[in-house]
Image: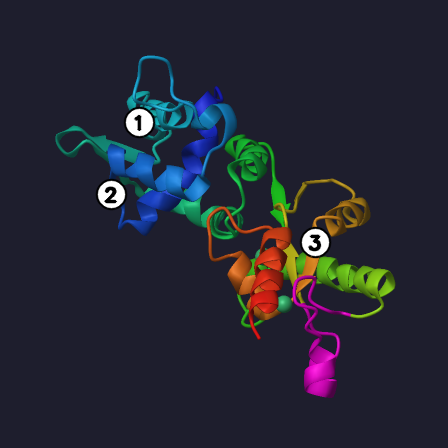
Amino acid sequence: MAIFREAELILPSLYMLDSSGGFIRTKDLIVALTNRLTPTGKDATLIAGRNDTHFSQKVRNLVSHRTLDNLGLANYIEAKNGLQITVKGKSHLVANQLTIDYLMENNFSWGDVKPALVALSDPKTEIDIFKEIFEGDTGATKETKIYKRSKELRDAAIDTFLKDYGALSCNICLFNYEETYGNAGKGFIEVHHKTPIYMYKGADQVKTIEQAIKNLAPVCANCHRIIHRTRPPYTIEQVAEIYQKIRTISP
Ligand SMILES: [Zn+2]
Ligand SMILES: [Zn+2]
C-alpha cells in the first residue's frame, strides 16, 4: 500500500470522527484537526491564491483522495460532505488508542507529534509510548506493557532528578511533597514530557530511557495542570515566568 503524504492524518482523523459521534463534516474536521494539532511553519502558511494552508489542504486531500474510503476506515457521504467512521475504522482506532490518545491529549506541538504520526501511518512500524500520567487505575491488560515502560521511565527520571537537584521539587514553584506531606509525600512528583516520548519496536530501551530523561521535567500537580491548560501547552519557562511575576506583584 502506498503511503500518501496525508497518511499521517489518518489516525488523528479517526480520533476526531470518533469523538464527534462517528460522523464529521470536512470543514469541521479541518477546524478540529487544526485546533488540536496547531500546525506551525510551512504547514501553517497559506497556499498561494488559496484559502487553504498546507495543513488544511492535506486534510482536504485526505477526504478528496478518498484515502480513508480506500482503506475501508471511513465512508465519504457526499450529501453531507463528511466522513462516517466504519467498523474497521473504529477497530483501527481502538488498536492504536493509547498511542493516539497520548499524542492528541497532551497538547504536544504538531512538529513534535508529526514524526510519530508518520511512523504510525506505516503499518510495518510499531511504536511504544510512555504515558505521562500513568498512576491510578491501570487494570486493563492492554495497558500493562505501557504501564511498565512508563513506570521504568518515571523511576529512572526520579533517580536522575534526585542526583541532579538533590530533592524532588517542582521545577516551576519549588513545591516539595515531602516537605509538605511528610512520609505521605515522600518520593512523589509528577513528570512532564516536554516532547512526546516513544520507542520504535526493537530499539534499545536503556538508551531510549536515557535520551528520554532529557525531555522530562519534575513538576507539582498544580503547575502541571496549568502547563496543559493551553494548546500547545505552556513551556516550563513560560509558567515559571507567570508564577514569578505574580509573586513579585503580590504583597
Ligand atoms: Zn509547582
Ligand atoms: Zn505534562
State the CA–CA distance, disc 2 to disc 1: 13 Å
Horizontally, is 28 left or right of 134 in the view?
left
What are the residue bounds of the magenta stretch?
Answer: 168-189
Give whichever of discs 3 and 2 has the lower sequence position: 2
Q: CA distance from mark 1 to mark 3?
A: 37 Å
Return the x and y of residue 209 as percentages of the image width and height. 76, 50
| Circles 3 and 2 in contact, beta carbons < 8 Å | no
Residue 171 among those drawn in magenta: yes
How many numbered markers are drawn?
3
Q: Nearer the viewer, residue 199 or 124?
A: 199
x then y, percent, for residue 220:
63, 68
Ligand 2 lies in quarter: bottom right
Disc 1 crowd, CA 10 A, few/some/many (<14, 14-19, 20+): many
SS category of the residue bearing label 1? helix
Q: Residue furthest left?
A: 79
245 shown above or below 183: above
Q: Amino acid at mark 1?
A: Val
Q: Residues within 10 Å of mark 2 (few under 14, many from 20)?
A: many
User: Which residue is at a point 60% across and 50% down the rendered structure image?
Assistant: 235
- Mark 3 CB lies closer than 8 A to ligand 2: no
Say whether residue 46 is visible.
yes
x and y percent of residue 6 in the render?
43, 25
Question: Where residue 203 sits in the image (x, y, percent)?
Answer: 74, 40
| Residue occupied by mark 2 | 23
State the residue position of label 3: 216
Q: Amino acid at mark 3?
A: Leu
The response on whether ligand 2 sits within 8 Å of label 2 is: no
Locate the C terminus and report the quarter of the image it occupies. bottom right
Specify the label residue 63 is tagged with: 1
Disc nearer the start of the sequence (1/3) = 1
Quadrant of res 164: bottom right
Task: Give above or below for 197 relative to 29.
Answer: below
